[in-house]
Image: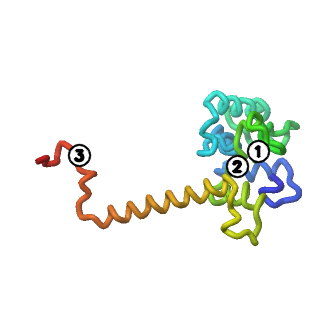
Amino acid sequence: MIEEHHISTFDAASFFSLHDFDSSGAWTPDEVRRLYGLDDESSKEVGREKREEVTREVYRLFDADHNGLIERDEFVRSEEVMPDFGVGPGHGVGANPVDKQLGPGHHGDDEYEYEIHHFEKYHDENTREEDLTHPEDIAHFRKHDLEADAEERQEQLDRMPIVEQNIPQKFRRNP
């Protein structure tokens, strides 16, 4: 939290507000999953049972009135600590893969996540393109390449007056 959000001190209220993604004053199960990065593409290997376990445990710790929401006041009054479920120090790149159960949590789009969880940690403003050789760098830029290719294909289709692939087979004239 401190490293990725560039703050040296924070309190429970600040932490809660920063992760209250819809600014409703309460965390929903969706926000808890987002906090832990469970709905992100990088966590697709995390099974449904583990996702439910994480949500249940966080709710057990912080939903004092058991109404299905974790309100700001409940979180701030609680003396509990957010469980890490295998994230945190020692669970990142190069850590024992058995211990790495969940991703780092996701707050923004892919660019923001790459920037705060990888680039700022392992690179700096003097890093040259040829130095971006970590698996995370390669995957990040591969995704850019795939998006650019898809955009180019779509532009080609948009220039066509008729896209035969879009015509259902039953309406086509087959010689």
Q: Tell me if residue 57 comes above or below residue 73 in the rendering.
A: above
Is residue 26 in view? no
**Disc 1 designates what residue?**
72
Q: How far apart, in angstroms, are the residues tagged by discs 3 and 1?
A: 52 Å
Calculate the distance from the C-alpha at mark 2 to the C-alpha at mark 3: 45 Å
Give the residue furthest to the left: 175
Residue shown at 44% from the left, 58% from the top: 150
Q: Residue at label 3?
A: 168
Residue 164: % across, % down: 24, 54
Measured as percent of width and height from the top left, residue 69 is found at 69, 37
Residue 85 falls in image quadrant = top right
**Secondary structure beneath disc 2?**
loop
Amino acid type indicated by mark 1: Arg
Which is more N-terminal, label 3 or label 2? 2
- Disc 3, SS: loop
Q: Residue at x 81, y 61 (%)?
A: 6
Check disc 2 and report the residue beneath it: 20
Left or right of 143? Residue 134 is: right
Circle 3 packing at 10 Å, graded few (<14), some (14-19), many (20+), is few
On the image, which quarter does residue 127 sit in? Answer: bottom right
Q: Nearer the viewer, residue 18 or 115?
A: 115
- Rendered view: 83 above or below 14: above
- Distance, label 2 to label 1, CA atoms, is 9 Å
Residue shown at 67% from the left, 30% from the top: 50
Dots 2 and 3: beta carbons under 8 Å? no
| Tags 2 and 1 touching, CB below 8 Å | yes
Dot 1: element? helix
Mark 3 belongs to which amino acid? Pro
